[in-house]
Structure formats: C-alpha cells, structure tokens
Amino acid sequence: MRITEIYQSIQGESSYAGLPCVFVRTTGCDLRCRWCDSEFTFTGGAKMSVDEIVAEVEKYACQLVELTGGEPLLQKEINELASRLADAGHTVLIETGGHRDISRLDARVIRIMDVKCPDSGESEKNLWANLDALRPVDEVKFVLASREDYEWALQVIRQYDLENRVGILLSTAFHTVEPPQVVAWMLEDKLRARFQLQLHKYIWQADARRV
C-alpha cells in the first residue's frame, strides 16, 4: 500500500468527533474537489505492507482507527487492512469520497461516505448505488460551499429517505458558506442531521498537518 502518514490525534469530524483516533492516510485520489484540503496526498507517500501498517497503528494503543486519504478505496489491500484492524479489536472507520464501491468492505467497518455536492465539481461521479449499501451505523456527509449545495443536499436526503436510514453530516467547506447560515437552513427545514465543524481546524492552524 502507499501511505502518506500514520499518526494519532483526535477525530475532527463525524459522530466520533473529539475522540482519540489513529489516522492511516493513504496516498492517491481520483477526484479533484475544488475545496480539497488534502492535496498533499495526491502523490508521494511510502510503500508499506499491511503487516507494517498494523504494527505502526498498534504502537499508539488506541481503539479508534480511521482509514482516510486521498481515497483509501483506491488501494487494493484496503479491505484486508480494514479486516485485520477489526480482528485486532479496533473500531474501524473509513472515510471515502462516495464514488467507489463500498459494498465489499468488511461488515465491521463503519463507512463515513461523502456525497459530492455540485460546488465540489465532482458531483457527477457520485456512485448512487452506494446509498443502498449504507447501514444505520454508517454516516453520509455533505460538504457545502453555497446555498445551492444545501438545497441539492436536502433534495438527495429526502429523495433517498436518508433521515430514516443513516446518520447524516453537514459541514461547510472552510471559509465558504457561513456555519450559522447553514444551521438556520437546517432548522427551517426541520432537517434531522448533525451539523459539524472540522474541529482540528479550530484547535490548530487550518492548514496544519498530522492533527
């Protein structure tokens, strides 16, 4: 596998926000979202075996592990890695862009899946069949950069009955649409979703690495 970094911090997003977490960040992504904050993962990285990655994770003695990127589902060994970590007793999260098939992942892995909104520039690549593979333990995330993104996300949420099927996360692309405005829209529409901020960007510098 090609790995950009492995480190421990707190989880900055999702319903697991604030918890200590080990992040395994893979290298490579086949999307180019306009607001991407992880462009450093597109190239480079170091080649590591699944055994080496598991050994590095275990050094932190931390129960929660997230597989992220880049796009982790581009790595052919990702399913083996996820299963090995689950076998070792870890709670395993995977954060994926939503354009790669999630149905083959180990059932113990919690999917945190983006649905790309129009302002990302990548909404046409959403793999809509993935929504059928989501379970109540999984979470679906919409990153918003405008009112138009919010209206689009609301339509998708209601069309696929996501409020009754899965955890929903709404967040804003950093320094785009203002968070209080999104919260007001959510309340007005009685949207049953979790609004989230990227905690790590408020605790540390917004462009800080390994946090």
Image (tube, rainbow, N blue to C red):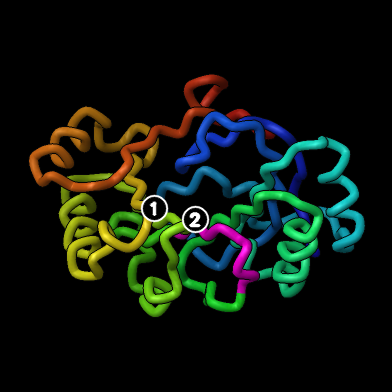
**Is residue 174 depicted above or below 137 in this figure?**
above
Q: Residue 117: x and y, percent?
A: 31, 58
Q: Which residue is found at the position 50% from the left and 64% from the top?
A: 31
Q: Is mark 1 on a helix, strand or loop?
A: strand
* Magenta range: 105-113
Q: Which residue is found at the position 36% from the left and 76% from the top?
A: 128
The answer to which image quadrant residue 64 occupies is top right
Q: What element carries label 2?
A: strand
Q: In this view, does 200 lie to the left or right of 66?
A: left
User: The N terminus lies in which quarter of the figure?
Assistant: bottom right
The residue pinned by badge 2 equals: 112
Q: Is residue 136 left or right of residue 117?
A: right
Residue 141 bears which disc, if any?
1
Q: Can residue 85 be seen in this view?
A: yes
Q: Residue 146: x and y, percent?
A: 22, 45
Q: Residue 123: x and y, percent?
A: 34, 66
How crowded is the residue under tag 2: few (<14 C-alpha within 10 Å), some, or many (20+)? many
Q: Which residue is found at the position 60% from the left and 53% from the top?
A: 93
Q: Are marks 2 and 1 in contact (CB under 8 Å)?
A: yes
Q: Which of marks 2 and 1 is nearer the N terminus?
A: 2
Q: Residue 201: x and y, percent?
A: 50, 27
